[in-house]
Amino acid sequence: MALRSWWKFLPALLGALVMLASHAEGEPMQDDMPAAPSAAPRQVVPQQVSASAWFVQGDTALGSKANRNFISNAGFVVTPAGVVVIDALGSPQLARELIAAIHGITPQPITHVIVTHYHADHIYGLQEFRKVGAQIIANRHAADYLHSETATNRLAASRVDLAPWVDVDTHIVPPDRWLDGSEDLEVGGVRFMIRPVGPAHTPEDQVIFVPSEGVLFAGDVVFRGRVPYVGQADSQHWIAALDELLKLHPRVLVPGHGPKSTTAREDLELTRDYLTYLRQAMRQAALDMTPFEEAYAATDWSRFEHLPLFKAANRMNAYNTYILMESQVK
Protein backbone atom coordinates (compact mmCIF):
# COMPACT_ATOMS: atom_id res chain seq x y z
CA MET A 1 0.00 0.00 0.00
CA ALA A 2 1.44 3.43 -0.90
CA LEU A 3 2.55 5.39 2.17
CA ARG A 4 1.21 8.55 0.57
CA SER A 5 -2.35 7.40 1.08
CA TRP A 6 -2.42 5.11 4.10
CA TRP A 7 -4.64 7.50 6.03
CA LYS A 8 -7.60 7.14 3.70
CA PHE A 9 -8.15 3.53 4.74
CA LEU A 10 -8.62 4.25 8.43
CA PRO A 11 -12.41 4.75 8.39
CA ALA A 12 -12.97 1.33 6.85
CA LEU A 13 -9.98 -0.59 8.08
CA LEU A 14 -11.02 -1.35 11.64
CA GLY A 15 -14.44 -2.58 10.61
CA ALA A 16 -13.02 -4.59 7.76
CA LEU A 17 -10.47 -6.27 9.99
CA VAL A 18 -13.21 -7.36 12.36
CA MET A 19 -15.18 -8.81 9.46
CA LEU A 20 -12.14 -10.52 7.97
CA ALA A 21 -11.34 -12.18 11.29
CA SER A 22 -14.77 -13.75 11.28
CA HIS A 23 -14.95 -14.59 7.58
CA ALA A 24 -13.93 -17.85 6.00
CA GLU A 25 -12.95 -17.94 2.34
CA GLY A 26 -14.29 -14.45 1.79
CA GLU A 27 -17.89 -15.15 2.85
CA PRO A 28 -19.83 -12.63 4.97
CA MET A 29 -20.94 -13.42 8.48
CA GLN A 30 -24.34 -14.92 9.19
CA ASP A 31 -25.24 -11.71 11.01
CA ASP A 32 -24.94 -9.85 7.70
CA MET A 33 -27.84 -11.87 6.31
CA PRO A 34 -31.47 -10.90 6.69
CA ALA A 35 -33.45 -13.19 8.96
CA ALA A 36 -35.14 -15.99 7.04
CA PRO A 37 -38.53 -17.40 7.93
CA SER A 38 -38.54 -20.80 9.60
CA ALA A 39 -39.01 -23.55 7.04
CA ALA A 40 -38.16 -27.17 6.44
CA PRO A 41 -34.65 -27.58 5.02
CA ARG A 42 -34.29 -27.85 1.26
CA GLN A 43 -34.13 -31.42 0.02
CA VAL A 44 -31.56 -32.85 -2.39
CA VAL A 45 -33.82 -33.22 -5.41
CA PRO A 46 -32.23 -33.63 -8.87
CA GLN A 47 -33.43 -31.37 -11.67
CA GLN A 48 -32.84 -32.57 -15.23
CA VAL A 49 -31.14 -29.99 -17.44
CA SER A 50 -30.50 -32.07 -20.61
CA ALA A 51 -30.87 -35.63 -21.85
CA SER A 52 -28.16 -36.95 -19.50
CA ALA A 53 -27.30 -34.08 -17.14
CA TRP A 54 -28.82 -33.19 -13.79
CA PHE A 55 -28.13 -30.87 -10.88
CA VAL A 56 -29.26 -30.19 -7.32
CA GLN A 57 -29.72 -26.63 -6.11
CA GLY A 58 -28.76 -25.26 -2.71
CA ASP A 59 -30.29 -22.37 -0.80
CA THR A 60 -29.42 -18.76 -1.56
CA ALA A 61 -28.06 -18.26 1.94
CA LEU A 62 -25.04 -18.74 4.15
CA GLY A 63 -24.37 -22.16 5.61
CA SER A 64 -26.21 -22.85 8.86
CA LYS A 65 -27.45 -25.70 11.03
CA ALA A 66 -30.95 -25.03 9.72
CA ASN A 67 -30.07 -25.44 6.03
CA ARG A 68 -27.50 -28.20 6.66
CA ASN A 69 -24.90 -26.21 4.70
CA PHE A 70 -26.88 -26.94 1.54
CA ILE A 71 -26.02 -23.63 -0.10
CA SER A 72 -24.18 -24.70 -3.24
CA ASN A 73 -25.06 -26.69 -6.32
CA ALA A 74 -23.76 -30.05 -7.54
CA GLY A 75 -24.29 -31.73 -10.88
CA PHE A 76 -24.01 -35.14 -12.46
CA VAL A 77 -24.06 -36.68 -15.92
CA VAL A 78 -25.25 -40.24 -16.56
CA THR A 79 -23.28 -42.11 -19.21
CA PRO A 80 -23.46 -45.73 -20.44
CA ALA A 81 -20.32 -46.51 -18.42
CA GLY A 82 -20.97 -44.61 -15.20
CA VAL A 83 -21.92 -41.34 -13.57
CA VAL A 84 -19.66 -38.28 -13.45
CA VAL A 85 -20.43 -35.91 -10.55
CA ILE A 86 -19.45 -32.26 -10.38
CA ASP A 87 -18.83 -31.09 -6.79
CA ALA A 88 -19.84 -32.88 -3.59
CA LEU A 89 -21.97 -30.44 -1.53
CA GLY A 90 -21.36 -29.06 1.94
CA SER A 91 -21.64 -32.03 4.29
CA PRO A 92 -21.33 -35.82 4.30
CA GLN A 93 -25.08 -36.16 4.91
CA LEU A 94 -25.90 -34.10 1.83
CA ALA A 95 -23.49 -36.21 -0.21
CA ARG A 96 -25.17 -39.39 0.99
CA GLU A 97 -28.51 -37.98 -0.10
CA LEU A 98 -27.08 -37.01 -3.48
CA ILE A 99 -25.66 -40.50 -3.96
CA ALA A 100 -29.05 -41.99 -3.09
CA ALA A 101 -30.77 -39.63 -5.52
CA ILE A 102 -28.37 -40.65 -8.30
CA HIS A 103 -29.04 -44.33 -7.58
CA GLY A 104 -32.75 -43.56 -7.85
CA ILE A 105 -32.18 -42.42 -11.43
CA THR A 106 -29.62 -44.93 -12.70
CA PRO A 107 -28.01 -48.22 -11.62
CA GLN A 108 -24.71 -47.02 -13.11
CA PRO A 109 -21.83 -46.63 -10.63
CA ILE A 110 -20.42 -43.22 -9.76
CA THR A 111 -17.00 -43.28 -11.41
CA HIS A 112 -15.67 -39.73 -11.03
CA VAL A 113 -16.14 -36.53 -9.03
CA ILE A 114 -14.72 -33.39 -10.62
CA VAL A 115 -14.19 -30.59 -8.10
CA THR A 116 -14.65 -27.07 -9.45
CA HIS A 117 -12.83 -25.56 -6.44
CA TYR A 118 -12.08 -26.42 -2.82
CA HIS A 119 -14.40 -24.15 -0.87
CA ALA A 120 -16.10 -25.90 2.01
CA ASP A 121 -19.64 -25.80 0.70
CA HIS A 122 -18.53 -27.77 -2.37
CA ILE A 123 -16.21 -30.38 -0.84
CA TYR A 124 -17.27 -31.53 2.63
CA GLY A 125 -19.20 -34.37 1.00
CA LEU A 126 -16.19 -35.80 -0.85
CA GLN A 127 -15.50 -38.50 1.73
CA GLU A 128 -18.80 -40.18 0.88
CA PHE A 129 -17.96 -40.35 -2.81
CA ARG A 130 -14.59 -41.85 -2.01
CA LYS A 131 -16.39 -44.57 -0.04
CA VAL A 132 -18.33 -45.60 -3.17
CA GLY A 133 -15.14 -45.79 -5.22
CA ALA A 134 -15.31 -42.59 -7.26
CA GLN A 135 -12.08 -41.05 -8.51
CA ILE A 136 -11.77 -37.44 -7.34
CA ILE A 137 -10.25 -34.94 -9.76
CA ALA A 138 -9.16 -31.37 -8.96
CA ASN A 139 -6.89 -28.64 -10.25
CA ARG A 140 -3.41 -28.67 -8.73
CA HIS A 141 -3.67 -25.07 -7.55
CA ALA A 142 -5.95 -26.34 -4.77
CA ALA A 143 -2.98 -28.03 -3.08
CA ASP A 144 -1.95 -24.92 -1.17
CA TYR A 145 -5.44 -24.51 0.26
CA LEU A 146 -5.68 -28.15 1.36
CA HIS A 147 -2.64 -27.71 3.60
CA SER A 148 -3.44 -24.20 4.78
CA GLU A 149 -4.49 -22.83 8.16
CA THR A 150 -7.55 -21.40 6.43
CA ALA A 151 -8.80 -24.88 5.55
CA THR A 152 -8.00 -26.24 9.02
CA ASN A 153 -9.65 -23.33 10.81
CA ARG A 154 -12.68 -23.40 8.54
CA LEU A 155 -13.26 -27.08 9.25
CA ALA A 156 -12.85 -26.56 13.01
CA ALA A 157 -15.37 -23.71 12.96
CA SER A 158 -17.77 -25.69 10.78
CA ARG A 159 -17.72 -28.62 13.22
CA VAL A 160 -19.21 -26.21 15.74
CA ASP A 161 -21.34 -23.90 13.61
CA LEU A 162 -22.75 -26.63 11.34
CA ALA A 163 -23.06 -29.53 13.79
CA PRO A 164 -24.33 -32.19 13.52
CA TRP A 165 -24.03 -32.04 9.72
CA VAL A 166 -20.31 -31.32 9.90
CA ASP A 167 -18.63 -33.05 12.85
CA VAL A 168 -15.42 -34.68 14.07
CA ASP A 169 -15.75 -37.39 11.44
CA THR A 170 -15.85 -34.86 8.61
CA HIS A 171 -12.49 -34.35 6.96
CA ILE A 172 -11.00 -32.67 3.92
CA VAL A 173 -10.39 -35.17 1.14
CA PRO A 174 -7.52 -34.60 -1.30
CA PRO A 175 -8.09 -35.60 -4.92
CA ASP A 176 -6.93 -38.89 -6.37
CA ARG A 177 -5.77 -37.03 -9.43
CA TRP A 178 -4.40 -33.55 -9.90
CA LEU A 179 -4.83 -31.69 -13.18
CA ASP A 180 -2.21 -29.21 -14.32
CA GLY A 181 -4.26 -27.71 -17.14
CA SER A 182 -6.99 -28.47 -19.62
CA GLU A 183 -8.02 -32.06 -20.06
CA ASP A 184 -10.77 -34.01 -21.75
CA LEU A 185 -12.27 -36.92 -19.82
CA GLU A 186 -14.29 -39.51 -21.71
CA VAL A 187 -16.69 -41.81 -19.88
CA GLY A 188 -19.11 -44.04 -21.76
CA GLY A 189 -18.50 -42.16 -24.98
CA VAL A 190 -19.39 -38.79 -23.37
CA ARG A 191 -16.72 -36.09 -23.52
CA PHE A 192 -16.15 -33.82 -20.53
CA MET A 193 -14.05 -30.75 -21.31
CA ILE A 194 -12.34 -29.76 -18.05
CA ARG A 195 -10.92 -26.26 -18.38
CA PRO A 196 -8.97 -24.27 -15.77
CA VAL A 197 -10.23 -20.70 -15.42
CA GLY A 198 -8.36 -19.60 -12.30
CA PRO A 199 -7.18 -17.56 -10.67
CA ALA A 200 -10.71 -16.17 -10.53
CA HIS A 201 -13.05 -16.90 -7.61
CA THR A 202 -10.21 -19.17 -6.37
CA PRO A 203 -6.77 -20.04 -7.79
CA GLU A 204 -7.98 -23.56 -8.66
CA ASP A 205 -11.25 -22.76 -10.45
CA GLN A 206 -12.12 -25.12 -13.27
CA VAL A 207 -15.29 -25.54 -15.31
CA ILE A 208 -16.73 -28.62 -16.99
CA PHE A 209 -18.39 -28.42 -20.39
CA VAL A 210 -20.32 -31.31 -21.94
CA PRO A 211 -20.36 -30.33 -25.63
CA SER A 212 -22.70 -33.12 -26.77
CA GLU A 213 -25.46 -31.56 -24.65
CA GLY A 214 -24.29 -27.95 -24.46
CA VAL A 215 -24.18 -27.99 -20.65
CA LEU A 216 -21.63 -25.90 -18.76
CA PHE A 217 -20.98 -26.58 -15.07
CA ALA A 218 -19.41 -23.26 -14.12
CA GLY A 219 -18.77 -23.64 -10.39
CA ASP A 220 -18.44 -20.35 -8.52
CA VAL A 221 -17.12 -18.51 -11.54
CA VAL A 222 -20.83 -17.75 -12.03
CA PHE A 223 -23.24 -16.80 -9.24
CA ARG A 224 -26.59 -16.70 -10.98
CA GLY A 225 -29.02 -13.93 -10.13
CA ARG A 226 -27.10 -12.81 -7.05
CA VAL A 227 -24.02 -10.91 -6.01
CA PRO A 228 -20.90 -13.10 -6.01
CA TYR A 229 -18.40 -13.25 -3.16
CA VAL A 230 -15.25 -11.67 -4.53
CA GLY A 231 -13.05 -12.12 -1.46
CA GLN A 232 -9.39 -11.99 -2.41
CA ALA A 233 -10.17 -13.01 -5.99
CA ASP A 234 -8.16 -12.04 -9.04
CA SER A 235 -11.07 -10.11 -10.53
CA GLN A 236 -9.22 -9.09 -13.67
CA HIS A 237 -8.50 -12.72 -14.58
CA TRP A 238 -12.03 -13.67 -13.52
CA ILE A 239 -13.44 -11.21 -16.06
CA ALA A 240 -11.18 -12.65 -18.76
CA ALA A 241 -12.31 -16.17 -17.85
CA LEU A 242 -15.96 -15.19 -18.26
CA ASP A 243 -15.18 -13.78 -21.70
CA GLU A 244 -13.67 -17.14 -22.64
CA LEU A 245 -16.70 -19.04 -21.34
CA LEU A 246 -18.96 -16.90 -23.51
CA LYS A 247 -17.16 -18.35 -26.53
CA LEU A 248 -18.40 -21.85 -25.63
CA HIS A 249 -22.01 -20.77 -26.33
CA PRO A 250 -23.54 -23.14 -23.75
CA ARG A 251 -27.23 -23.92 -24.09
CA VAL A 252 -27.58 -24.57 -20.35
CA LEU A 253 -25.44 -23.14 -17.55
CA VAL A 254 -25.32 -24.69 -14.10
CA PRO A 255 -23.76 -22.13 -11.74
CA GLY A 256 -22.10 -22.86 -8.42
CA HIS A 257 -25.00 -21.09 -6.72
CA GLY A 258 -28.49 -20.33 -7.95
CA PRO A 259 -30.90 -21.87 -10.45
CA LYS A 260 -29.89 -23.32 -13.80
CA SER A 261 -29.84 -20.92 -16.72
CA THR A 262 -31.07 -21.30 -20.27
CA THR A 263 -29.94 -17.71 -20.84
CA ALA A 264 -26.28 -18.46 -20.29
CA ARG A 265 -24.95 -15.40 -22.08
CA GLU A 266 -27.06 -13.07 -19.96
CA ASP A 267 -25.91 -14.67 -16.71
CA LEU A 268 -22.25 -14.82 -17.68
CA GLU A 269 -22.43 -11.17 -18.65
CA LEU A 270 -24.12 -10.16 -15.39
CA THR A 271 -21.29 -11.60 -13.27
CA ARG A 272 -18.71 -10.13 -15.65
CA ASP A 273 -20.36 -6.70 -15.67
CA TYR A 274 -20.60 -6.61 -11.87
CA LEU A 275 -16.89 -7.37 -11.50
CA THR A 276 -16.01 -4.84 -14.20
CA TYR A 277 -18.07 -2.15 -12.50
CA LEU A 278 -16.44 -2.87 -9.14
CA ARG A 279 -12.99 -2.48 -10.66
CA GLN A 280 -13.86 0.71 -12.55
CA ALA A 281 -15.49 2.43 -9.59
CA MET A 282 -12.86 1.47 -7.05
CA ARG A 283 -9.97 2.19 -9.43
CA GLN A 284 -11.22 5.72 -9.94
CA ALA A 285 -11.54 6.19 -6.19
CA ALA A 286 -7.97 4.95 -5.69
CA LEU A 287 -6.70 7.26 -8.44
CA ASP A 288 -8.48 10.22 -6.84
CA MET A 289 -7.27 9.20 -3.35
CA THR A 290 -10.89 9.24 -2.19
CA PRO A 291 -11.37 7.51 1.19
CA PHE A 292 -13.18 4.19 0.81
CA GLU A 293 -16.31 5.08 2.81
CA GLU A 294 -16.78 8.24 0.80
CA ALA A 295 -16.19 6.42 -2.48
CA TYR A 296 -18.58 3.62 -1.56
CA ALA A 297 -21.35 6.04 -0.60
CA ALA A 298 -20.90 8.00 -3.83
CA THR A 299 -21.01 4.96 -6.12
CA ASP A 300 -24.23 4.25 -8.00
CA TRP A 301 -25.09 0.63 -7.14
CA SER A 302 -28.61 0.76 -8.60
CA ARG A 303 -27.98 -1.85 -11.30
CA PHE A 304 -27.02 -4.48 -8.72
CA GLU A 305 -28.58 -3.53 -5.37
CA HIS A 306 -31.76 -5.53 -6.08
CA LEU A 307 -29.80 -8.79 -6.37
CA PRO A 308 -29.92 -11.35 -3.53
CA LEU A 309 -27.04 -11.05 -1.02
CA PHE A 310 -26.15 -7.53 -2.19
CA LYS A 311 -26.32 -6.24 1.38
CA ALA A 312 -24.28 -9.15 2.70
CA ALA A 313 -21.51 -9.14 0.11
CA ASN A 314 -21.20 -5.89 -1.80
CA ARG A 315 -19.42 -3.69 0.74
CA MET A 316 -16.72 -6.28 1.37
CA ASN A 317 -16.41 -6.94 -2.36
CA ALA A 318 -15.94 -3.22 -2.95
CA TYR A 319 -13.45 -2.85 -0.11
CA ASN A 320 -11.30 -5.75 -1.28
CA THR A 321 -11.40 -4.37 -4.82
CA TYR A 322 -10.47 -0.91 -3.54
CA ILE A 323 -7.38 -2.36 -1.82
CA LEU A 324 -6.51 -4.25 -5.01
CA MET A 325 -6.89 -1.15 -7.17
CA GLU A 326 -4.80 0.92 -4.74
CA SER A 327 -1.97 -1.62 -5.11
CA GLN A 328 -2.18 -1.34 -8.90
CA VAL A 329 -2.41 2.42 -9.21
CA LYS A 330 0.96 3.90 -10.12
Image: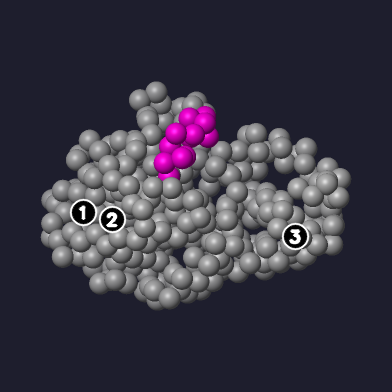
Instruction: Using residue 45 as the reference point, say whether residue 232 is left or right of it.
Output: right
**Looking at the image, which residue is at 71% across and 35% down?**
18
Q: Which mark is residue 329?
A: 3
Disc 2 packing (10 Å; few <14; some 14–19; many ≥20) = many
Of mark 2 and mark 1, the one earlier in the sequence is 2
Q: Nearer the viewer, mark 3 or mark 2?
A: 3
Q: Which mark is residue 76?
A: 2
Q: What residue sits right under mark 1 in the picture?
A: 83
Q: Is residue 318 visible?
A: no
Mark 2 and mark 1 residues within 8 Å of each other at the beta carbon: yes
Q: Calculate the distance from the C-alpha at mark 3 to the C-alpha at mark 2.
A: 43 Å
Provide the secondary structure element on which disc 2 rests.
strand
Query: What's under tag 1, amino acid-wise?
Result: Val
Disc 3 packing (10 Å; few <14; some 14–19; many ≥20) = few
Of mark 3 and mark 2, the one earlier in the sequence is 2
Of mark 1 and mark 3, the one earlier in the sequence is 1
Q: Nearer the viewer, residue 88 or 67?
A: 88
Numbered range of the magenta stretch: 142-153
Where is residue 159 shown, x and y percent of the image?
46, 27
**Looking at the image, which residue is at 30% across and 35% down?**
127
Query: What's under tag 3, amino acid-wise?
Result: Val
- Image quarter for residue 121? top left
Q: Is residue 120 above or below residue 279?
A: above
